[in-house]
Amino acid sequence: MQISFTLNGRPTTVDVAPATLVSDLLREQLSLTGTHVGCDTSQCGACVVHLDGAPVKSCTLLAPSLDGATLLTIEGLGATAGSNGLHPMQEAFREHHGLQCGFCTPGMVMTATALAAANPAPTEAEVRRGLEGNICRCTGYQNIVIAVMAGAAAMHATSAGE
Amino acid sequence: MRAFAYHQPNEISEAVKLLTSVEDCKVLGGGMTLIPTLKQRLAAPAAVVDLAKLPALKGISDDGVTVTIGAMTPHAVVAASPIVQARIPALAHLASEIGDPAVRNRGTLGGSVANNDPAADYPAAVLGLGATIITSAREIAADRFFVGLFETALEPGEIITAIRFPVPVAAGYAKFKAPASRYALVGVFVARFADGVRVAVTGAGAGVFRVAAMEQALSQSFEPTSIASIKIDAAGLTSDIHAEADYRAHLVTVMAKRAVTAASR
């Protein structure tokens, strides 16, 4: 079947079998490999993307659900802001060493940007609760939490200055 | 995942027609259970009927006595709804504790209730509040809806369109989460109405159930201490890798007391 949607700001039309996961469509058909598949069982959150602005797990989303929707992946997020091509949240993860192996990072960043968009100054407890669906098997949560709080502040400082 | 035909009807009548005429069909709500089931090939339907484009299945309304929530309303929307927060805050709280943020953005009320997972949260609220399940064919009282393990009173081809919740005087929900899945190891929903109290338990057994002894005690005196000495029989409760039946039985009383405390705030 043919589906049309907005992918990272660009109108996109693809032919897919209905039994296709969005994570597979992105990685295998559209070569957007920034969206990672960690557990493939909706637990780990490495595959989080924004569907019409809301963070969802792309490994548990059927491609036909994209028809008419707006999808943002980590590749699109990086292109939205920052002089070096990094979004303020990505910059904060780099600055605060919010990653170790980096596998979970795309999902962490996508969840974090949605969290910060809804809550400009999240507390540590709010960040930890907000990241319940994202697992880091390096268990480096401390710096991730620090990075998300700093990234939220940076996102809103940037938008206030615009 | 095996191949399937995909249908996205625009009318409820069209959806019902598909479900009754196309062989081996499954209903897709938010997909938080169906899609993992398809991926594990525990289900391999010939066709999937996606309810996402049925506007009649969305939205939250308040008529002064009841709050009605469309079946395709995601958990995150219920949790953030000013109507639900004002009228039945325990229901908004329950929705905010399901899964994780990404799951709450996709998972739906109707999907959870139709699936009737023995550890799901929503069945506790539906039974605890004595809600009415509105389907494409009729209205079903919560007391007659939950039949058994993953089993409901829904007939083949029958779709939940909305659930109508009576607004209680006070209500509370407390759950002991399984730490990895955040499903209820035991969850208790307590609702106080002018004419009595209802107590519904999820996670502990093969399906959601009420506890008459607690309802009577709380109708006399709506205090955690009224039910502190009520012991739940562990026979028939679930024993698994997460908890033995004895422990679940113990947790029912603990969570019920906490739910009463939450309702009294």
Image: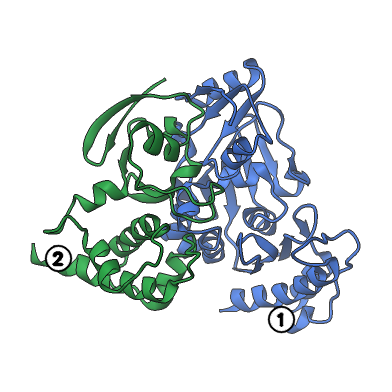
Identify which residue, A110 or A125, lies in the foreground. A110
Residue B36, numbered circle: none
Can residue B63 be seen here?
A: no
Does B264 sit above or below residue A111? below
Chain letter behind tag 1: B
- Residue B20, picture quadrant: top right
Q: Residue at x 42, y 34 (%)?
A: A65
Residue B246: image location, x then y, percent = 85, 70
Q: Residue furthest front?
A: A101
Can residue B51 be seen here?
A: yes
Identify which residue, B134 or B7, lies in the foreground. B7
Q: Amino acid at mark 1?
A: Pro
Give the quadrant of the C terminus of chain B.
bottom right
Q: How is the image coloured?
A: by chain
Q: Residue furthest top?
A: B21
Label 1 packing within 10 angstroms: few (<14), some (14-19), many (20+) = many
A110 on left or right of B103: left
The residue where tag 2 is placed is: A158
Chain letter behind tag 2: A
Residue B224, numbered circle: 1
Q: Identify the hue of chain B.
A: blue
Give the quadrant of the N terminus of chain B.
top right
